[in-house]
Every structure is written in structure tokens, then in C-alpha cells.
Image (tube, rainbow, N blue to C red):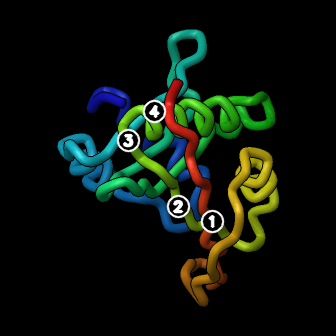
Amino acid sequence: MRAEDLDIVMMIEQSSFSTPWSRGSFRNLLKRTDADLWVAVAEDEVVGYAVVWYAATEGELGNLAVSPGRREQGVGRWLLDWTLQKAAERGAERIFLEVRLSNQAALDLYESRGFVQVGLRRRYYRAPTEDARVMCLELAPPV
């Protein structure tokens, strides 16, 4: 992701989440050396993005979203796989994430890649208030 991608990233963000991140959050993450921000591009257009940050040998997938017109076409799967590969190359041994209990599409995606629930955060999300599943995936070292 680059600063010039932020207009479309913000459109995707606002259409994907009830409490979207701010443009400033993305700008600040772009400056951090302990974070990776990736975009998926199709036909010269950003169609999705993923954000992961790291501490020691752990990563956290903070955000993954796909533009509404590109959902259910494999973009999210591709972005997740790319992000997991890059995290392993960076030395991450495991990746954590939180996901709304009601977000079945995301849960199905994460479980299909081997994520397992390791905790529950009560009332984690707002608008509407909802619990979050904490999920983790142990990463294989890169080949």
C-alpha cells in the first residue's frame, strides 16, 4: 500500500466496517517499520487490502477488506494467503486476529486457512456491540 492508494482504501474501509479506521490511522501505519500494508490490484484498481503489525515473533492481522463489487471472487483468500506468506518470511511464528462472532464469511475464510479460536473478547466491537473471537494460526517457516 502507498499513500496514493488511501482514497480507494478509505472507500473500501467505510463500506466494510461499522466503525472504520481513519485515514490518519492508515497514514501512521504506512510509516511504521513493524507493520505491513498490502493491496490487491485487479485491472489497475485497488480491490482489497490487508494490514498486519508485528511484535517479536508474533503478528496481528488488524484489518482485511475487499471492495463490495469484488467479494466472493477469491480476493480475500488471495490477500490472506499473501499476508501469511509475507509474515512467515518476516519471521513471524504465529498470527492473531479478532473477528466478529456474526461475520460468518470471515470466520469461514480464517478457519479454511487453519486459524483456531484461542479466546473471546466480550463486547469488543461497537455499532453494534458484539463479542470478538480471538483466533490464531501457527505459521510454518518459509521454504
Q: Is residue 40 above or below residue 30?
A: above
Q: Is residue 40 above or below residue 106?
A: above
| Quarter-of-image position of residue 129 | bottom right
Q: Residue at x 18, y 42 (%)?
A: 31
Which residue is disc 4 drawn over? Answer: 86
Does the image show residue 74?
A: yes
Considering only order in the chain, which callout, 3 or 2, is on the residue closer to the N terminus? Answer: 3
Considering only order in the chain, which callout, 3 or 1, is on the residue closer to the N terminus? Answer: 3
Label of residue 135 in the image: 1
| Mark 2 and mark 4: Cα distance apart in space | 15 Å
| Left or right of 102, for residue 123 | left
- The image quadrant where one finds the N terminus is top left
| Mark 2 and mark 1: Cα distance apart in space | 6 Å
Which residue is disc 2 drawn over? Answer: 96
Considering only order in the chain, which callout, 4 or 2, is on the residue closer to the N terminus? Answer: 4
| Mark 4 and mark 1: Cα distance apart in space | 19 Å
The type of residue carrying mark 4 is Lys
The type of residue carrying mark 1 is Met
- Asked if marks 2 and 1 touch (Cβ < 8 Å), the reply is yes
Which residue is disc 3 drawn over? Answer: 91
Neighbor class of circle 1 (other Cα within 10 Å; few <14, some 14-19, many 20+) is many
Depth check, mark 1 against mark 3: the one in front is 3
| Left or right of 45, for residue 57 | left
| Mark 2 and mark 3: Cα distance apart in space | 14 Å
